[in-house]
Amino acid sequence: MPDIDRIIEKLLGSRRISEGAAFSSRSYSDQPIIERGSDLKRRMDQRRAERGARHQQDAEQRQRQVRQQRPQAPRSTLRQQARGLADWVMSLDFELEEHAGATPERVQPRIAQTPPLPEAIRQMRALEGQGIPATLAYGSGAASSLFWRQAQLMADYEDDYEFHGGFSQYYPTYASMSDHQLRGYFSWRTRVRAGRMDPAPLSFAFVHVYELLCGVGTTPGEQALSDLWDFGHAYRDVDEAQGNKLMGYLRTWATDYAVYHNVEGALAHPGPDELGEAALVLLRAEHAQLRREGRAPRIENPAATDASPTPEQLFAALGAASTYHLCEARLAKDEPQLVSDVACDVFAALVSHCSKRRKTDYVEGLFGYASRMPYTMFAAAVFYDPEPHPDCTVRLGEREAYACKDGRWTHLLAIDARHRSADLGLALHAVDQELRRQLDYPYPLKERPVPKYLDKIVRDAVARRLAERAEAERRKITIDLSKLGGIRAAAALTQEALLTDEEREDVAPAQAAGQAAPVTQPPTDTCEADAPDARESLPPHVDAAPASEATPSRDDPAPAGLSALEARFLSGLLEGTPASQLLGPADPFVSVVVDTINESLFDLVGDAVIEFADDEPRIIEDYLEDVREVLNP
């Protein structure tokens, strides 16, 4: 030890601190440890007391605020509470006096002031202590079966009790009410059945709905369903906020009631389901296409075994099931057939693409598979049926059904369509955008990014349909039979102009002898052997013109070498008569007559005298005087 002291002294020198000085420094205290612990405990107790006082003050302040905000009870309620307190005090006084040796006659008037509980309510209360046999609890809890038995017992009970107060309870039943609340409920129900809807706590309304669901106070079936809706609407008219909460549950319970009791009138109109029906049409179209292509759907669906929908039904379903309303687009209204054909082609191509390259078929990938889920009838309601429901299947439209097997319900959906498909909307938008681009439509759409495979499918479908339409337009031939007479006349005129002088001399003796003149066929591919005569092609109300007028000859006397028809045509143009009124069905075409006139007057005028303006012939203004001189030499 001396060696250690010497080492420490050598290291510290004069800086060595004594043991007593160490305990007197700022970091340490020479106070005993017990005293320091007592001081710490005292300070902690003081802080705890201060926090408790603050919490007490906050609680008292909150109570004062609640009392200030709480509505004042009516005087009648206060009097009733005072009477109840007085009755309790008198009953307690009676017990004290009885124990003290007082006679019952002294307190009999005091006991008579307490109103007796109706016998029906006492009998109903007696059921709560008997317990519920297990055989009555099929498919429900003991509370539901107890409620059903009490409701049957009190089905026709009426009361006239002045109730002031409230009642709030999850899954409210008779057992959860006090006697005071119970008599208030039955008094309110009496007025409701009489047609008077008074404001009441929401829990009262739920109890009355539970009664109707269990068939209490109504006739099961359509009448009970109607009473449910009538009560819900009437309660909402009195208290809108609480009534909306009740109606939110009532919509589901009404559908459950219609299914449970097979109310056909309610099942026939379950409500509009445009999305579900459209998705079912697409599913049927997909399965029909896969069967035609020799491929089976990955998941068979009994609702998709019907025949394939028509193109019109498929196009309408595409618009109803997608986020892009292609059926209402501007181009679809201008080119409905083209847009429908391309959209259906794209749908078919996507069905084939998914069937070959994906593990999920196209429509089921958009909306989901068929589902079969366990279902609880009248969920969140107090409902009980003493008899198990028979096995059945109830359908709500083509897409939805409910099935009961051994008392357990199942909800069936042919296709689980809950929202419009954005992927399908992207494909239909691409169809509309590409069609507008290819047609140079004046209202183009902004291009959206799409997958490469979808872009190729859309472009190929649009190109194929546009090529088919162009080919159909090219092959379209329109034959106007009313022009046949003019064609024959023009052909005869051309034939006559091609005859030489020797041929004309041969034709004249043959015509004089009454023989048919030889006919020289014009160089044309048209065969008129089977064509009807020009006179036969005329309408019944038009008289056939003589042969000399039907085929005018240049040898007829007319100015400047014009035929009578050409002179008449020129005169009509000078007078402003339309060309369609100057030529008959047996006359040549307007263009043939105009060319003949321009050729005849070219040597005289040195230019064409007739031109076409907007497909209508007219005499050039510079040559009007020349034409008048030709017609009136």
Image (cartoon, grey):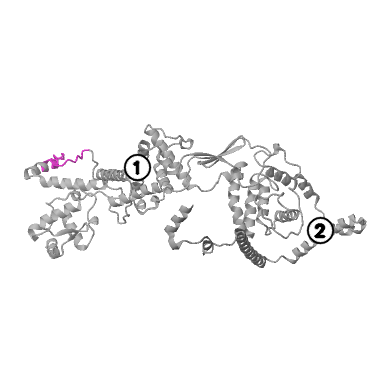
Q: Quadrant of the C terminus?
A: bottom left
Disc 1 from disc 2: Cα separation: 86 Å
Residue 566 lies in quadrant:
bottom left
For numbered disc 2, what is the local secondary structure? helix
Which kind of residue does numbered mark 1 sit on? Asp
The residue beneath circle 1 is 345
Which kind of residue does numbered mark 2 sit on? Trp
Q: Main secondary structure of the magenta part?
A: loop
At x 39%, y 35%, the residue is 290
Which circle's residue, 1 or 2, is located before the other in the chain?
Answer: 2
| Residue 293: in magenta span | no
At x 66%, y 53%, the residue is 169
- In terms of depth relative to the viewer, which is nearer, 66 or 127? 66
Say which of marks 1 and 2 sits in front: 2
- In terms of depth relative to the viewer, which is nearer, 128 or 596? 128
The reply, left or right, for residue 415 in relation to residue 624 is: right
Q: Position of residue 538 (x, y in %)?
A: 27, 47
For numbered disc 1, what is the local secondary structure? helix
Q: Is residue 83 visible?
A: yes
Relative to 513, does residue 167 appear above or below in the rendering?
Answer: below
Label 2, residues with CA under 10 Å away: few <14, some 14-19, many ≥20: some
Q: Position of residue 457 (x, y in %)?
A: 31, 43
Residues shaded magenta:
508-529
Single out the residue that lies furthest toward the top. 294
The residue beneath circle 2 is 88
